[in-house]
Structures are given as structure tokens and as C-alpha cells.
Amino acid sequence: MFYGRVKALGSIPKMKIGLLFAIAAVAFASIGMADADVFTLDEPIKTTPFKQADFKWTVTPRHDYSKTYVTKLFLSQAEYDREHLGRFKMRDNGKQTVRMTCEKAFEAIKGMDEITLGIPKIVYLVGWQYNGHDSKYPALFEGNKEVARPCDKDPLDSVRWLMRAAKQYHTAVSLHINLFDAYADSPLFDEYVRADVLAKDKDGKLIIGDWAYKVNYAAELEKGLLQKRVDRLCSLLPIQESGTIHVDAFHSRVPFPYVRPDGRIAIKFLSPISPWHGTTLEQDVAAKRNIVKYFDSKGIDVTTEGADMDVGGGHEGYFPMYWHYGNRDYSLSLKASQACGGDCGVKAFGDNVSGEMIFMNNPDLAKAFNIFKREFCKSVLICQYLNTFGRKALIEGKDGSIGVFERGVRTMWKGGRLSVAKDGEVLCDGRDLLIPAVWLGDGAMVAYSENGCNDRKWKIPSGTKLSTQAKAWTIDATGRTVFTRFKIDDGVVTITLMPNEMVLIK
């Protein structure tokens, strides 16, 4: 632990004070923090160096998730009558709430591709099946007619069309699925009961989780039923072409709801998954590992909901991406190319933006695109840049944190905003920015202003090549428009932007 400032030195002999500063100087220099004063934090300040953990891929990722924008699009939610404990779903009630059809999802993907300047993208579809999200599991074999195109008799044809049509917009479309839940109205429920692959308590009674009964991974694998449903799903939809799938709620323990003495409902996590079958937690985790390996054998990456649902540690290389990353230890011991995701455990290292929530909360696409443009510039654009630099340390203070990267890059997370600097020059102040668009090569940058700016000056960072002959375009979901309110002189970009204006300079 290092401290950025020293107080109450009056009681310490001068020789010892000098020694303290000498030790601190060596320690800070060893992780490249000589120019740390570009950003400041209130004390106390603790510095944790990045220490690369032993790491080896168990699977073979088909995508580099540190160089890809990953999101979901929410199509439809299956409605239900609150049954278990008056709160938890056990079966559909036949209704659903449609948020987005396959055709509208296609329009969203096209608009996102314009705004993201063709960055590689992965989109997972939520609610593509049966009656919508969380419907009819463990079955995975019918499309949702309410989100299908009118011209398609089989709703899965609409999903196939979307998965293939999105490729021209630098987007791999795949599915959001659940392998743990088993609903009483599922076409597979009776078969799974007969096969004895559902979780049971020690008395042989089916376990009811937070939503639905639960599949015993180990028993399903042993009897070949997991392989059977994965094979069938792959025969129905081109998931192997997409090379990825998202497994939701991939728990190693059963989320079990119960009524507390005060009458409130709480959740506890029970392990092992199925005491009746005699499997242990270790065997449940081993079964999950084999599920991931089975998808891998078919050329499909598995991403999952959270780092807390791992199969033995992120250092073992089973999951290349987590939707809710939120793991400080991973951030400080693994490269972005080894583990990444949204809700980053260390905000100073960058974050993702949920296109799913933006489009779900804003059904008008024009409004959604404006919000998406802002959030993309302030998160994904920055994160893509940061992912090209090795992490060196995290400095923490009472009011925020500073990320220290290789080659003179620093960030500061403070007041809910992320700032970025390189070689002591600010590239983003939390509202305005000029950041390299790294996926376009070393001669492209994006300028953005949240509230507008007039003749704002930005120094072009080392490693980026912009000449005085560079051209620029305003970017939005409809395409590009020539932009002229800028000039480049002596390595400095001077630019005037309107509020929420995004400009590509190349």
C-alpha cells in the first residue's frame, strides 16, 4: 500500500522524511506514476499494482471481446401470474409484452452500426422464443410469433433472417438462453421429470427456485439430454456461424426464495443443486465446465451473466466475457483480452453501455439513437481505447479512483464521470472528448461534446496520425455528413461542436 500524500510530518525526523519520500518515489516510478498529478484525488490514496495472474484459455474464443461492442436487444417478455410465494413465476399466463420485433431489431442494428463506425458487434436476442423472455425452458426450439416478420410462417425463419442479415452491419447476432430453469408448462418438462434430471431436495421433492424448477446439470449431461438440446438448437439456428451464445443465470447454486420471520421474502443460495442425486458443489461446477466445453467443441463461445457464476475462476479461461463483470480481482490481475464485460469492477478501467436498456426504455428509435450515441462516446469508445494499453495500477481516494496504464495513459473516475489523459494531455474531461477510434486504424479520432463547445483545443496524442489534410464527418444513425467546423495545426485540433454532436476525423 502506498499513500499519495503524507500528513503530520512534524513529528518525524527529517532524515526519515527524506527516506519516506525516496521509498515512495521508487515505488511510484516502478509502476510509472511520475506524472500522476494530471488527475488528483482526495486522500487517503491507496495504490494497488496490476499483477498478471497465471492464465490459460481452456476454450478457444472466436471473438476478441475486448475489441467488440457486446449488447443485448430485448424483444419480448413472457407474462405470468405470480404463483410461488405470490411473487415467482412457474408458468406463462399466455400473454406477453413485445418491446421490439425482429424487423425493428434489424433497424436498431443498422443505426448502431452507423454510430459505432462499423466496430465489430455482438447482439444477443432476449425473448426470441415461445412466449418471450423466460418462457418454456428447458425447451429452446420454437420462435416467438409475436416478434416475427409477417412474411414468415415459422417464427424461427425471422430469427434466422436477422442473424444472417446483421452480418453486413459488422454484427454477429446470437441468442440469450437459460440452461438452469425448467418451467411446468415447458414441452420438455414431463420428459425431464421422467428422466430424473431435475433438482430434488434430500426427500426427493422437486426444488422450486426463484423462478421455475431447476435442471441438475450433472444428471442432464450424464444422460445426454444437454447435448441433445444444444445439438437441436444448432440445427435450427445458425449459432455456429455467430460463434457465440449468452447463458443467463448460469448459477452453481440454487437461488431459493423463503419467507423470513418478519414476513418478507428473501433469497438464499443452496448447494449442492440436487441433494437427492448425491452430486456435490464440485461436481455441479465440473458439469458446468463440461457444458462450456461442449459449446466450444461446436465452435461457440459461451458468455455469461456474472463473474460470480464462474466455473472455477476467471484465470482458467472458460468465459471471455461477462455481462455483469463487476470483479475487482479480475480487473487487477487479468488483461481485458482475458476477461472483460459491463459493470466493470474498476470504473477507472472503462465500462460498457447497455443498448438493451436504451432501446427498451425508448421505443422511438430516433430518441434511442441519440441516447445511444452519447453513451457510446462516453463509455465504449473510451473503453476500446483503454483496452489497447496494459494496466499498471489503480489509485484509490475518498472521492474516486485513477487508472494507470502503460505508455503514459491515465484515467480518473470521479463524480460519476470518466476522464482520460495521455502523456499529461487530457483527451476526455467526462463531458467532452477527442479519442482515437482504434478499430479504424491509427489515423482516426472521434470528437464529442455533451453540451457543445466553441473552439475547444485538443492535442493529438502520440501514436495517432492526423494531418492538416484530415477530413471530418458528423455521425448519427442515418449516416455521415461532411463537417468543417475544425482545423488541425501543429498537432492540435481546434473544434466547435453542438450539444450531443459526434464527429469522426480521419
Image: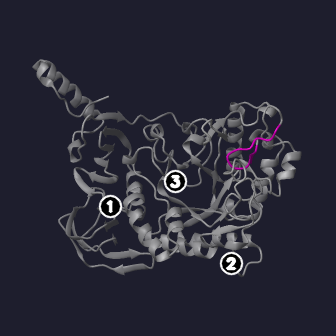
Residue 326 higher or lower than 271, as above or below: below
Q: Secondary structure at mark 3?
A: helix
Q: Position of residue 324 (x, y in %)?
A: 52, 49
Distance from disc 3 to disc 1, alpha carbons, whole Å, reads 20 Å
The residue range painted magenta reads 205-215
Say which of 264 and 483 sits in front: 264
Q: Nearer the viewer, mark 3 or mark 2?
A: 2
For disc 1, the marked residue is 435
For disc 2, the marked residue is 149
Q: Secondary structure at mark 2?
A: loop
For disc 3, the marked residue is 65
Say which of 301 and 210 sits in front: 210
- Three-letter code for the amino acid on which mark 3 is drawn: Tyr
Q: Secondary structure at mark 1?
A: strand
Q: Position of residue 171 (x, y in %)?
A: 56, 66
Can the viewer see residue 57?
no
